Image: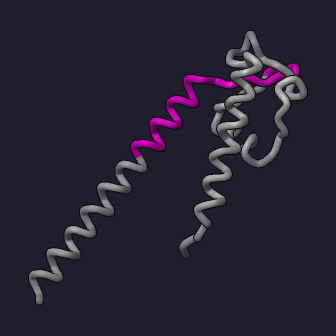
Amino acid sequence: MAVHVPVHVVHAAGAHRRRIIDAFRRSGATSAERATPLDRIEVERDGVFRSLEKSRILRSEPDGRFYLHEGTLQEVDERSARIGALIGITTAAVLALVIALVLLFR
């Protein structure tokens, strides 16, 4: 069963993700040594935050402070870009095949 998510919802989630990441960068919380309490970073622990935490882009220290792991962020973004490119190439190949079949059996 396909799940249909409106484009504006996807865009809003991406913008919210960027705001959270930017807040961590502005606060300087970009390493375990510079981990910062969330109230100083001024972000809420919402669904997007939890998603970033689950993917280990945002990490917590035992004392409850958080930081942005730039290396993991880069890996996740690169993986997403590769998947997007693969989907685009696959879509183009299927479309070319359909066009070729239509022209062949006219």
Q: 106 above or below 41?
A: below
Question: How is this picture coloured?
Answer: one colour
Horizontal side of residue 56 vs 101, given as left or right: right
Residue 93, percent from left and from top = 24, 63
Q: Nearer the viewer, residue 9 or 97?
A: 9
Viewer can see residue 7 = yes
| Magenta-drawn stretch contains 81 | yes
Q: 19 above or below 87?
A: above
Residue in the image at 75% along x and 12% along y: 34
Q: Residue furthest top?
A: 33
Locate residue 51: give its quadrant: top right
Q: Give the mark count.
A: 0
Horizontal side of residue 85 vs 47, given as left or right: left
Residue in the image at 28% along x and 62% along y: 92
Residue in the image at 84% along x and 39% along y: 44
Residue 5, percent from left and from top = 61, 66
The quadrant of the image that shows the N terminus is bottom right
| Magenta-drawn stretch contains 18 | no
Locate residue 16: give its quadrant: top right
The quadrant of the image that shows the C terminus is bottom left
Q: Which residues are magenta?
A: 61-82
Q: Nearer the viewer, residue 59 or 12?
A: 12
Residue 66, percent from left and from top = 78, 24
Horizontal side of residue 70 vs 41, given as left or right: left
Residue in the image at 16% along x and 79% along y: 101
Q: Residue furthest bottom?
A: 106
Viewer can see residue 64 = no
